[in-house]
Structures are given as structure tokens and as C-alpha cells.
Amino acid sequence: MNGRNKTSTQYLRRPSGQRPMSGRGILIIVLTALIPPVGLLLLWRQGAFRARGRMVITALATLEMMLLGVLLTPRPELTAQMPQPAAPVAVTQAPAEENLSALYNIEELLYQEQLAQVVAAGGDETDIMSDAQKDAAREAEREQVLNTTVYAVFRNAQRYHAQMVCGTQSNGRALTVREAMLEALSPCPDCNPPVWTE
């Protein structure tokens, strides 16, 4: 009887490579596809498949997770921006001349050095000026004096004044020294307004 039982059990057993997939195996595959971490945990804990099958399923689940990670990762929108030139705030602006060199102001530097030597010797700026420069400086001074605002009374004015009030007299009319000279007004001896003498 033992021999009969042995042969009957041989016919009832299926080879291990051809086992039908159980409900537990289907559940693990579905979970691995939908929720890969949970499916992989059950796959390796339950041992529903052979080692080679588990490794293939693990590799496929890993690829699925990587693909989902790539697809679901937000990508920042890159906008192209043109660079804008800007000068630093603390930089001294260079003169607006076309050709600049390290000695672009050499004439001014030499003039200042010469002036310092003349002043040290007891002279003044007029000692180093040319005749044309002296004439130009005198003309500029003349224009400054002649364009200075002075004051006079409205009627029968004989003098012009430096301020609107001189002593007890109120001078309501404003005019320039040039206009006062054209009207033959003389400067007030009390308030000493500017006067130009040739």
C-alpha cells in the first residue's frame, strides 16, 4: 500500500515551476503596480514568488517609481532675461570726453601747482595770468557787478541802494547796476551798493 500511495501522490503533485498563481500573488502584483512600496514589502515578506520573480517585479516597480518621480516633479519655468548694464552707485563718473587718458586734466594740475608757488611767494592769481586771461577775468567781474540787483525809489530817484530799506527810506523798485548807471543814478554813500568804474 505504501508503494501505491507514493505513486498516487506523485501524480497529484505539480512541478513547482507550473504552480497556479494564488489570489495572494495577484493581490501583491496589483499592490506593487498601484502602491509600489506597500506591494514590494508584501512581495518580499510573503515570499509569494521565487527569488527571480521577486527581483523582476522589484525592478519593474523601481522603474515605475522613478518614472512617476520624474513626471510629477515640478519644473521651474525659466525666463530669458537680457542683462542690463548698470554703473555702481559709489563710482565717480568720468568726464564725457571721447579720448580720456590718465593725464586728461594735466593743464589744470600744472596751473594749480604754479598758482601754489606764486601764492607762497606772496603773489596772487593775476601774477600768472596772460593778458587775455586778465581781460577775460576783468570782463567777467564787470558783468557780475553790472548785473547785480540794487534798489531805488519809484519817483525822482537820485541814488540807488544795496537793500530795499536804507535808513528810513523804503526803496521798492528793483533794477540792475547797469540800469541805474543808464539812468545816471549815483551809488548811496551810506549802504555802499556795488559800483563799476572803468
Image (cartoon, rainbow, N blue to C red):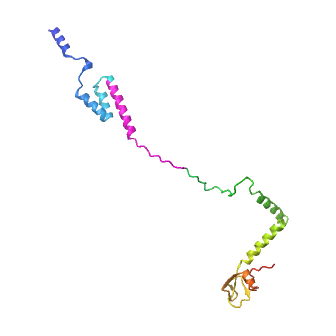
Tell me if 89 is positioned left or right of 156 in this view. Answer: left
From the top left corner, tell me how far across and down residue 84 is, in percent: 56, 52
Residue nearer the viewer, 138 or 28: 138
Image coordinates for residue 20, horizontal then vertical, percent: 23, 23
Q: Residue at x 34, y 31 (%)?
A: 61
- The answer to whether residue 124 of the structure is visible from this angle is no
Up/down of 6 relative to 193, above or below: above
186 w.r.t. 63: above or below: below
**Residue 160, quarter of the rendered image:** bottom right
Query: In this rendering, would 17 be left or right of 190?
Result: left
**Span highlighted in magenta in the image:** 53-82
Q: Is residue 65 magenta?
A: yes
- Which image quarter holds the C terminus? bottom right
Q: Main secondary structure of the magenta part?
A: helix
Q: Is residue 198 above or below residue 110?
A: below
Inspect the magenta stretch and tell me whether residue 48 lies in it. no
Q: Position of residue 183 (x, y in %)?
A: 74, 86
- Residue drawn 37% across the image and 32% down it: 63
For the view shown, which residue lies furthest in the front direction?
A: 98
Q: Which quarter of the figure is the N terminus placed in?
A: top left
